[in-house]
Amino acid sequence: MLGAALALGGAAALGGLGRRSTTVREIQASVSPASSSSSRGAALSINAIYRRAAPGVVQVTSTSVVNVPPDPFFGNPFFPQQREEQSLGSGFVVDKAGHVVTNYHVVSGAKAVRVSFSNGASTKASVEGTDPSSDLAVLKIDASSRALTPLPLGNSDAMQVGDPVVAIGNPFGLDRTVTAGIVSAIQRAITAPNGYTIDHVIQTDAAINHGNSGGPLLNGRGQVIGVNSQIDTGGSSSGNVGVGFAVPSNTVKTVIAQLIRQGHIDRAFLGISATPITHDLARVFRLPSTRGLLVQSVQPGSGAAKAGLEAGTTQVVLAGESYKLGGDIVVEAGGRPVSSLSKLRDLIAARKPGETIRLVVIRQGKRKALDVKLGRQPTAPAG
């Protein structure tokens, strides 16, 4: 699974490019955006979506400094060299205050960021906030509100398999390229840059390549329903093979609101790893419940550990999958039944660190209620 930012490679030793940073600009003839009323009407043509949304899509150029290992044969063998590297990604304007959404991995580690607009203007951007757990970042630019075209965020939960979608971005530096396709699947899960899971992801066959990262995925009414973030190449190439993934807009709404307000996100943390019970697993091993989550491990010092949750200890294999049995089976969280990891993560995500959630578990055939005080999510998963 690959992120879709486009690295431009090393440029020179430290100091060599400080005064001539390259920025790729977007140039297009002036086009008036369509009336916002069309977003509530019938589906638009691809051209109409492009004309309306493209002025709000930007190209993001991030510059970072990387260490080059010392060469014992050439150059100075004792001190590592440094050089500047640039990478290209995409983004889009979300409000008249100058906030721009992109991917975290597009600007991670950047010492300088610039954005380019459809009229050819290029300006510096500051990183307002980042969230590696959702692979999202918010940039801030100083620009006249009249020069900005915010893109509306739609309801990603309303998307269904087969719905038409349009992606706009800068693949391989080709500014504001439009591609079209359909929603190939919903409720996918992908891995964030820090190793956590991003749920409710939209899969699409609209062509997404390196450089599309951070650009919008739009529905048939021109509303953003996802942020293009990753592609799966199947290990056969580094380019698009029709399997792309977008962070859903409903996640984007929640994340960017907090990033704009406080620059970071404090996520609640339970402290277990678990796996869902399948029908075959319950039947073969005669589990006391046909639904729920088998606790596989409990992180020491976590709220789950302090509340006394117990992990499985007996290793079994079924259909090539490994499970630990004998521990607690979580069947309820916060008064809601849980039978999937994404459901449990949603219930935890709706709470703040320090809050308490009641879990109902089955232990040795009996139901037991445990009150767990949630901690703060670590920067990366344990192990």
Image (cartoon, rainbow, N blue to C red):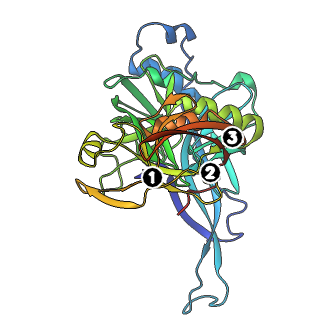
The dot on residue 139 is 3
Q: Does 26 appear above or below 166?
A: below
Name the foreground residue: 331 vs 92: 331
Element at badge 1? Answer: loop
How far apart are labels 2 and 3 at the CA level?
9 Å
Question: In 3D space, how far apart are the residues under numbered discs 3 and 1 (Cα atoms)?
Answer: 45 Å
Q: Which residue is mark 2?
A: 107
The picture places residue 273, in percent across and down from the top left corner, at 49, 52
Structural crowding at the residue carrying mark 1, measured as other residues with C-alpha within 10 Å and reported as few (<14), some (14–19) or many (≥20)? many
| Kind of residue at badge 3 | Leu
Residue beneath the point at 29% across and 43% down:
282
Secondary-structure class at tag 2: helix
Q: CA distance from mark 1 to mark 2?
A: 42 Å
Q: Which mark is residue 327?
A: 1
Q: Give amino acid for label 1.
A: Gly
Residue 263 location, x and y as percent? 74, 42
